[in-house]
Amino acid sequence: MATRRGRGRPPGESDARERIAAAAVHEFGEHGYDGATVRAIAARAEVDAALVHHYFGSKADLFAEITDFPLRPDLEVPRILRGPREQAGERIVRFVLEAFERPDVRKRGVIVLRTAISGKLTAPLVTGFLSRELLPRIATELDAPDASLRASLVASQIAGMLITRHVVKLPAVAAATVDELVAHIAPTIQRYLFE
């Protein structure tokens, strides 16, 4: 008579989550965000691809977890765009600026920004993540033939704002309040999105 296995984790898989995370770091590092696949990560970790999804969800979720970044613009910005259209630019700028007021987000966000600017190996990770996970989601919410360009212009404006405020620390931008920056930048974002 066969012995029934109880519920719970399969035998020998106690370190699977850690192996998957380590494999993901290697795969993302070697192949960039676009080149890394869940199958390749699973193969490197010597687990089934379903286990990767079980522990981490999507590839974007796995990427967010291994980079330890607590902000998910790929999920939040499309939600923001579904609200009242006339305040979308303001809501996006305020969301990003207020998130970066939190020390945990700012610390990790500055690391991501710096590596995106200067890291030959890490820049493709950030670019791939934005190109695959964020920009198409913004473009989907826009009703325009040049939606991809508009989404990219929004990203360029937001990235520039964050770099000048938190990396380069231009005095006037670094000293400005969230409300001041929203008042100046939101109209440009609004124009990129809808005008």
Image (cartoon, rainbow, N blue to C red):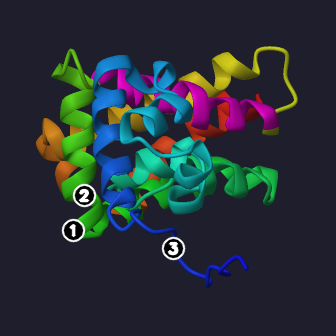
Q: Quadrant of the C terminus?
A: top right
Q: Amino acid at mark 1?
A: Pro
Residue nearer the viewer, 58 or 79 = 58
Q: Nearer the viewer, mark 1 or mark 3?
A: 3
**Label 1 belongs to which residue?**
103
Query: Which region is colored magenta?
Result: 123-140
- The residue beneath circle 3 is 9
Point 81% across, 58% down: residue: 84
**For the residue labelled by badge 1, is the local secondary structure a helix, a strand or a loop?**
helix
Q: Residue at x 50, y 21 (%)?
A: 34
Contact between labelled residues 2 and 1, with CB atoms less than 8 Å apart: yes
Which of the two marks, 3 or 2, is nearer to us in this view?
3
Position of 76 with respect to 23 (left or right) is right
> Is residue 135 depicted above or below 30 in this figure?
below
Residue type for callout 3: Arg
- Residue 179's spot in the image, x, y percent? 42, 63
Q: x and y percent of residue 168 in the render?
A: 13, 35
Q: 10 Å neighbourhood of mark 2: few (<14), some, or many (≥20)?
A: many
Question: What's the distance in space between the residues labelled 3 and 2, CA to CA?
Answer: 36 Å
Describe the element under mark 2 as helix, strand or loop.
Answer: helix
Label 1 to label 2, Cα distance in Å? 5 Å
Mark toward the start of the polypeptide (3 vs 2) = 3
Residue that mark 2 sits on: 106
- Answer with the quarter of the image where residue 171 lies: top left
